[in-house]
Image (spheres, helix red, strand yellow):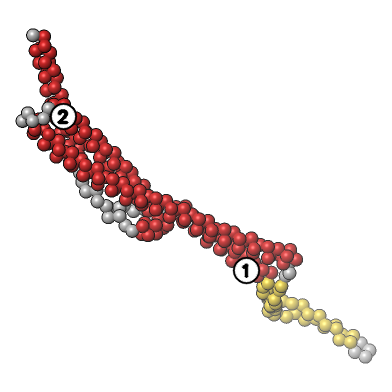
Amino acid sequence: MKLIMKRKIELIVYVFLFFLTIQQVEAQNEVSDSKSESIELLIPSLQTLIDSAKVNNGLVKYRRLEIEAKESNLKSKRKYWTRNFGIQADSRYGTFNNFATVTGDNSTVNLASNTQQFNYNVGLYLKIPVFDVINRKSQIKQAKAEYEQAKSMVKSQEDELIEIVIRYYEDLVLKQSLLELRSENIGNARVNMEMVEKEFKNGLVEITEYVRISDMTSRIAAEFMKAKSDFLISKKLLENLVGFQIN
């Protein structure tokens, strides 16, 4: 009698687990179906991504502005000597007092007159500061070195950016392939689960086998969700780097 009661209790427990498992599988299927949108991306070519990243990357922009600043400074240093060379002019207009002395044989005559006139002077000047002459070559050399340094920094920054784009690109391609694989697995697992469920209802499969298949389906669904999360993260990182959305 006790053995019969024990078997009845075990049967009730199995039935309870059976319905609980069905609800879990249905919930997982609903989640999978709701998120089974297309995962196929039209990923642009690697060179297109690299070119876009160069244009939109803030640090590369900053380095390029440094080149412009250093180039402007170099030009200024090369033209600095012209400040010592120039044209000077001045003009005056007004009443001028003119005095003259005329000396003869036995007498001297002083003449005075007032006239209104316009006077002007034009001339060239050239200053040769010794320090500027000595230091000019050194200043130009320093400015040229700073300009070349700025160009090298841009090249270095672009090379580093290209490496990052390549890594993100390859990572996205890999994550998309893995997600497609997980998507196929979850699809096959759901079909298999439906078949096992029908066979279980017809008494062709034991409950232990049903629970095992259900657990396997749950693990495959979890792997699919993890792969999808990794894929979306990889996609967002690459989009943020290149400055546009990948569809």
Q: Amino acid at mark 1?
A: Lys
Q: CA distance from mark 1 to mark 2?
A: 89 Å
Horizontal side of 156 relative to 173 (left or right) equals right
- In this view, the residue in front, 130 or 35, is 35
The numbered mark at residue 127 is none
Which residue is pictured at 59% across the width and 59% down the height?
146
Give x and y (percent) for residue 208: 16, 26
Q: Is residue 156 above or below residue 188?
A: below
Please tell me which of labels 1 and 2 falls first in the chain: 1
Q: Amino acid at mark 2?
A: Glu
Horizontal side of 105 relative to 130 (left or right) equals right
Give x and y (percent) for residue 52: 38, 57
The numbered mark at residue 209 is 2
Q: Work out which residue is located at the far bottom of the displayed protein and give it.
A: 105
Which residue is pictured at 14% across the width and 38% down the height?
192
- Give the SS element for disc 2: helix
Total labels drawn: 2
Q: Which residue, given by chain and number where applicable, does mark 1 sit on?
A: 79
